[in-house]
Image (cartoon, helix red, strand yellow):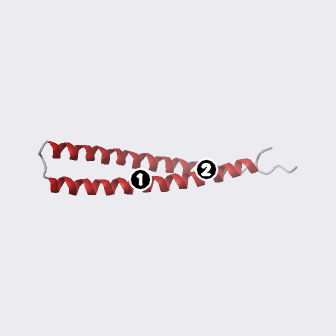
Amino acid sequence: MVIQKINTNEIENILKSIDEKAIQIRVLQESLERVNENLKLNEKDFKLGKISMEIYRDIKANLEKETKTLEIEIEKIEKEAKAILAKLCEIMNENKI
């Protein structure tokens, strides 16, 4: 059996990519939390009579749209991270002794 040299540069690049994806996901999740907090505040302001029904619905629609956009982006990045991890697993399996 021939032992191949492990390409540590490729592994290092993959690990950096995974780290970048994790940071992107964390930032998007924090944004999603803020949007959800704003949704709650919007509802609270409406119930307290601070804003009209029209403004409430407008803000709610915009925030729900932003929520959906963030969720889609998080899912997309998660899929990308999983693909990168699969590549790392493939490399590691190829280099087992």
Which mark, by number, is residue 85?
2
Question: How far apart are labels 1 and 2 at the CA level?
Answer: 21 Å
- Nearest the viewer among 84 and 63 is 63
Q: Residue at x 27, y 57 (%)?
A: 62
Q: Earlier in the sequence, mark 1 or mark 2?
A: 1
Q: Secondary structure under badge 1?
A: helix
Query: The residue tagged with tag 2: helix, strand or loop?
Result: helix
Foreground label between 1 and 2: 1
Label drawn at residue 58: none
Identify which residue is drawn at 13% across, 42% down: 48
Residue 56 at x, y = what percent? Answer: 19, 52
**Mark 1 neighbour class, 10 Å CA radius: few under 14, some 14 to 19, many 20 or more:** some
- Asked which quadrant contains residue 49, the reply is top left
Q: Quadrant of the C terminus?
A: top right
List the residue tagged with mark 1.
71
Q: Position of residue 55 (x, y in %)?
A: 16, 55
Query: x, y (%) of residue 96?
Result: 77, 45
Q: Which residue is depicted at the point 37% across and 55% down? A: 68
Viewer-proximal residue among 48 and 8:
48
Q: Label 2 sits on what residue type?
A: Leu
